[in-house]
Each structure stands twice: as C-alpha cells, then as structure tokens.
Image: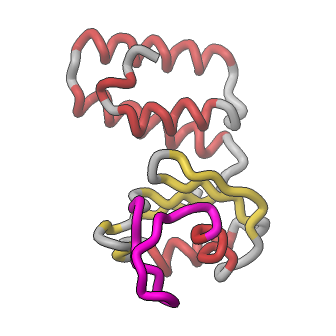
C-alpha cells in the first residue's frame, strides 16, 4: 500500500485486521478510497485518526476480543531481572495468567488476542491498562 510511509505501524495493523474482519467488499473499497484521499491531503493527524477508526471497526468485526498497544521490543523479565526481547512466549505466559487464550498475534508492537471467554478481556483491561512495561506505558482495549 502506497500510504505506508505516513504511518507504517498502524497501516500494517489495519491491513492485518482486514484478513480477519467480516467486512463486505463495499466497506473495504470505501476505506481504501478514504485512505487514498488522505494521502492526497497529506494530513498525518487526520490520516492517523482515520486509520484508528478503521482499526476499531475491523476489530469489532473480527474474532479478537482484546488488544494491547505499545508493547516494547525489549523489557526486563521479572523472574530473571534481565532485559530480553519480548516475543510470543512472554506474551502467552502473561495472557494465560488471566485465562484461556484461544489465539493471539503480535503486529508492530500491538497484540491482538482472542480469549475463550470474552469477559476475561474486560478483567485484563482493568488490570493492565496504563501499566508500565519496560520503558513504555501499554494501553489495552476490550473489544
């Protein structure tokens, strides 16, 4: 997508969610046309706001029911007190403390999760939203 250079992180996340969302072709074509218009305008703030709205809409249409934004690339692991690259094993261990995880994926510092019981996402959101992880504050969203 030629718009990646405006904000590659959120563009990658939106394109990823398009694979899972149950959206009709008209919605997808409309959003792509809006994005092309934003490229012409080159207003990065409006472009980011539009992509965030699209991402939220796609989340509601997908099977994911919890999202964690702003995961750092490296963090200190509490059990070893050593800095390690955050990967699937670390995320799965953390998520399973809240309940059964059906599936999850990490896209550009954002984790999309499907808990078996959607109410787990609400509890996880209340527990870890705005927590400090490494040197970044994570944001969560229960969908």
Residue 20 percent coordinates (x, y): 70, 37
Question: From what the image shows, is residue 7 above or below residue 126?
Answer: above
Q: Which residues are magenta?
A: 72-89
Looking at this view, is 19 or 94 the one in front?
94
Looking at this view, is 16 or 33 the one in front?
16
Q: Is residue 25 left or right of residue 6?
A: right
**Callout count:** 0
The scheme the figure's colours follow is secondary structure
Res 11 quadrant in image: top left
Residue 75 magenta-highlighted: yes
Residue 18 percent coordinates (x, y): 62, 31
Going 40% across and 39% down the picture, which residue do you hit?
9
Going 32% across and 34% down the picture, which residue do you hit?
48
Going 74% across and 57% down the picture, which residue do you hit?
103
Looking at this view, is 66 or 138 the one in front?
138
Q: Is residue 141 left or right of residue 135?
A: right
Going 40% across and 72% down the picture, which residue do you hit?
75
Residue 123 percent coordinates (x, y): 58, 78
**Can you say which quadrant of the picture contains the C terminus?**
bottom right
Looking at this view, is 39 or 50 the one in front?
39
Residue 81 magenta-highlighted: yes
């Amino acid at each position: 997508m030629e718009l990646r250079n405006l904000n590659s992180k959120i563009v990658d996340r939106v394109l990823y969610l398009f694979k899972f969302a149950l959206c009709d072709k008209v919605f997808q074509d409309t959003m792509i046309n809006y994005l092309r218009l934003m490229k012409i305008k080159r207003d990065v703030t409006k472009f980011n706001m539009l992509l965030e709205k699209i991402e939220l809409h796609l989340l509601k249409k997908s099977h994911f029911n919890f999202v964690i934004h702003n995961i750092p690339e490296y963090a200190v692991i509490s059990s070893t007190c050593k800095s390690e690259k955050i990967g699937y094993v670390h995320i799965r261990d953390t998520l399973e403390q809240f309940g059964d995880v059906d599936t999850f994926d990490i896209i550009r510092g954002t984790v999309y999760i499907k808990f078996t019981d959607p109410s787990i996402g609400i509890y996880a959101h209340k527990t870890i939203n705005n927590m400090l992880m490494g040197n970044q504050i994570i944001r969560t969203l229960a969908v």
